[in-house]
Image (tube, grey):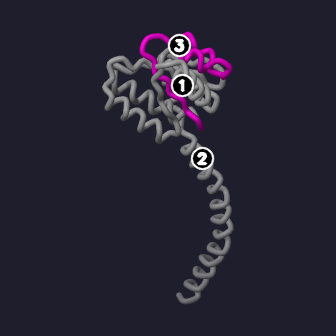
Amino acid sequence: MNRDQKTDVISALNDTFSKAKFAVVADYRGLKVTELEKLRKNLRQNDAQIQVAKNTLLRLAVKGTPYESLTDSFSGTTAVAVGFTEPVGPAKALAAFAKEYNAFSIRSASLEGSILKPEDVEALSKLPSREELLAKLLGTMAAVPTGFVRVLAAVPQKLLYALSAVKDQKDN
């Protein structure tokens, strides 16, 4: 790899880190390409990606980004997963993959400038996703008017029951 290619890789990585909301550093030693492709597919579904790069290039790429604190984690075989919208989806995909394949291990992560341990990423993966939270909020918001309509509908319904009872009483 010549100097120009390295500069291009550093620039692309720096752009990726600048756009990212969540980053995870992992060790992928011993994984097969097909297994890594499976992880890539799962991350793509969660608006995230994983990249493998040389540690020196990663150290240069994180300079000037909120992920500069991850520099100490760049050693050995390093893969960096970055999420662009919300951290829960990528955390779930990475934690599930780490459980399934022992060769993949999370070293550290960064969320909005704070360093997370592997246990923190595991805890983050257990939270409900953004879509689940929105669905719960929508259900809660829809319950209030639905209950109100039921209360309003109960008044004429009770009147109808009373009139029906009077009619039955007069028929007898």
Q: CA distance from mark 2 to mark 1?
A: 37 Å
Element on which disc 2 rests: helix
Give residue 134's mark: 2
Instruction: Give the magenta-colored segment's residue range.
Output: 57-85
- Mark 2 or mark 1: which comes first in sequence? 1
**The disc labelled 1 sits on which kind of residue?**
Val
- Mark 3 or mark 1: which comes first in sequence? 1
Element on which disc 1 rests: helix
**The disc labelled 2 sits on which kind of residue?**
Leu
- Give the side of residue 146 with respect to residue 48, left or right: right
Q: Is residue 76 magenta?
A: yes
- Where 162 sits versus 98, above or below? below
Q: Which residue is mark 3?
A: 56
Element on which disc 3 rests: helix
Residue contact between numbered discs 3 and 2, judged by CB atoms under 8 Å: no
Q: How many C-alpha atoms fall within 10 Å of the one at disc 2: few (<14), some, or many (≥20)?
A: few
Residue contact between numbered discs 3 and 1, judged by CB atoms under 8 Å: no
- Give the side of residue 32 with respect to residue 135, left or right: left
Q: Which residue is mark 1?
A: 9
**The disc labelled 3 sits on which kind of residue?**
Thr
- Where 49 sits versus 55, above or below? below
Q: x, y percentage for residue 44?
A: 47, 39
